[in-house]
Image: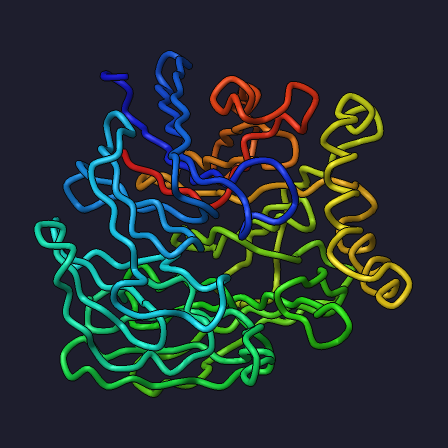
């Protein structure tokens, strides 16, 4: 694996439509743009579930596999071998099994901050069993979190809450002042799971993640909502929305995952709509799209994947009582019957865009800003790494959030 200038890490949650209930693993994809050579490694971890997001410490030696299974799990960034794990239930019990430490923010090579239950907690890799409990985070289910450009603020998104007595849309994001510990909850018209701070300015971006709860109340089993979508630009000094972008429901910008940015564009992939969207930061109006929607021939070549996707969607709720949600989800997916790109990361020199397509089980690299396809690498079947998965089952690895080092 040595000698490759780029390392693209992607969290894995196994085959199927519901990543918050699946397996937990990592894919490490190496690439050399000079030669076109690439290599990969895949590992699934026993005793950990619902792999979701990943990150690597500043020195690039230790990685974190965030999950919705109530573990903190760390791996060697070079080999993917597990180096440490601890149950977060020893510190605080969440109100729902959907809540886990899916994301964290590194403070330095050994220390990090994450959310457990209703509080923030500060940890050291050298003593995972004795963290420091901080103040309440103030949101429903905290999700993506990152430090601002200066490091002064921690920005974080929130998921809708399915727990009894607290059910409902989040419709807010949070900001923690890292100097004073003050927490501010900023109300928004939509829920936003995922956020990204600006590269240099003290603002951050939150992208709407709109779902339709089963039977109008169940946010554990939800469908993709066919509604308009938003991007909010939020000023960290005033804790207010400075600008926002809204787009009609016909735009394929539903169920976003990774967010990255260049000097000129905010870039985010949309697993529900099979697209990568590039929003112009100058006017926050114009946009362009890479469309990875599979055609009929591609779908015909993947009968197990399509069958699993359709079955999992129908199993999430009462077909007759929630038919409007299923019809809406079909419009969101543009009738493709597969999910799509969940990982996208731009290289530091802003020349290469790395992506991982969950539905089609391939990793693609595009030249940026031309968005010309440079490499498309089909990835192996999950059965090679998880013998418990039937040979007749869906073969997808289950790509989710990614991070790029190099």
Question: On the picture, is 335 further left or further right than 79?
Answer: right
Front residue of 101/331: it is: 101
The residue located at (50%, 36%) in the rendering is 355
The residue located at (51%, 69%) in the rendering is 159
Front residue of 391/257: it is: 391
Q: Within the image, what quadrant is residue 2 found in? A: top left
What colour-coding does the image apply?
rainbow
Whole-percent x, y for residue 311 in the image = 78, 43
The outermost residue toward the left is 126
The residue located at (48%, 55%) in the rendering is 265
Question: On the picture, is 251 further left or further right than 154?
Answer: right
Front residue of 358/373: it is: 358
The outermost residue toward the right is 320
| Depicted 136 relative to depicted 294: above or below | below
| Depicted 46 relative to depicted 252: above or below | above
Question: On the picture, is 157 further left or further right than 125?
Answer: right
Quadrant of the image containing the N terminus: top left
Whole-percent x, y for residue 100 in the image = 40, 60
Whole-percent x, y for residue 205 in the image = 44, 67
| Depicted 96 relative to depicted 394: above or below | below
The residue located at (36%, 72%) in the rendering is 117
Quadrant of the image containing the C terminus: top left
How many numbered badges does the structure rendering display?
0
Whole-percent x, y for residue 255 in the image = 62, 57
């Amino acid at each position: 694996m040595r000698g490759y200038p780029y390392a693209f890490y992607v969290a894995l949650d196994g085959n199927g439509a519901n990543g918050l209930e699946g397996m937990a693993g990592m894919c490490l994809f190496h690439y050399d743009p000079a030669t076109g050579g690439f290599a990969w490694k895949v590992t699934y971890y026993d005793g950990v579930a619902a792999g979701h997001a990943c990150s690597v410490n500043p020195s690039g030696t230790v990685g974190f596999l965030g999950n919705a299974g109530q573990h903190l799990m760390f791996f060697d960034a070079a080999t993917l071998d597990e180096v440490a794990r601890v149950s977060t239930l020893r510190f605080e019990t969440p109100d729902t099994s959907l809540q886990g430490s899916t994301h964290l923010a590194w403070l330095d090579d050994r220390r990090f901050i994450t959310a457990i239950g209703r509080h923030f907690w500060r940890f050291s890799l050298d003593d995972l069993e004795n963290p420091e409990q901080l103040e309440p985070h103030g949101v429903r289910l905290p999700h993506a979190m990152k430090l601002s450009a200066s490091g002064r603020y921690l920005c974080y998104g929130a998921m809708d809450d399915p727990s009894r007595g607290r059910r409902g849309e989040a419709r807010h994001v949070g900001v923690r002042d890292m100097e004073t510990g003050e927490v501010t909850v900023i109300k928004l018209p939509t829920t936003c799971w995922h956020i990204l701070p600006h590269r240099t300015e003290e603002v951050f971006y939150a992208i709407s993640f709109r779902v339709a709860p089963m039977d109008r109340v169940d946010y554990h089993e939800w469908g993709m909502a066919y509604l308009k979508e938003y991007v909010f630009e939020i000023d960290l000094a005033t804790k207010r929305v400075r600008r926002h972008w809204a787009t009609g429901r016909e735009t394929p910008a539903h169920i976003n995952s990774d967010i990255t940015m260049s000097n000129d564009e905010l870039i985010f992939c949309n697993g529900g709509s099979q697209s990568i969207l590039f929003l112009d930061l100058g006017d926050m109006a114009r946009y362009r799209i890479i469309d990875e929607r599979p055609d009929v021939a591609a779908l015909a070549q993947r009968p197990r994947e399509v069958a699993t996707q359709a079955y999992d969607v129908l199993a999430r709720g009462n077909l007759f009582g929630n038919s409007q949600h299923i019809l809406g989800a079909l419009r969101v997916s543009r009738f493709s019957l597969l999910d799509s790109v969940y990982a996208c990361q731009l290289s530091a020199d802003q020349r290469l865009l790395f992506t991982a397509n969950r539905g089609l089980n391939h990793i693609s690299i595009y030249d940026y800003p031309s968005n010309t396809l440079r490499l498309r690498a089909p990835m192996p079947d999950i059965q090679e790494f998880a013998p418990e998965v039937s040979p007749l089952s869906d073969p997808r690895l289950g790509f989710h959030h990614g991070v790029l080092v190099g």
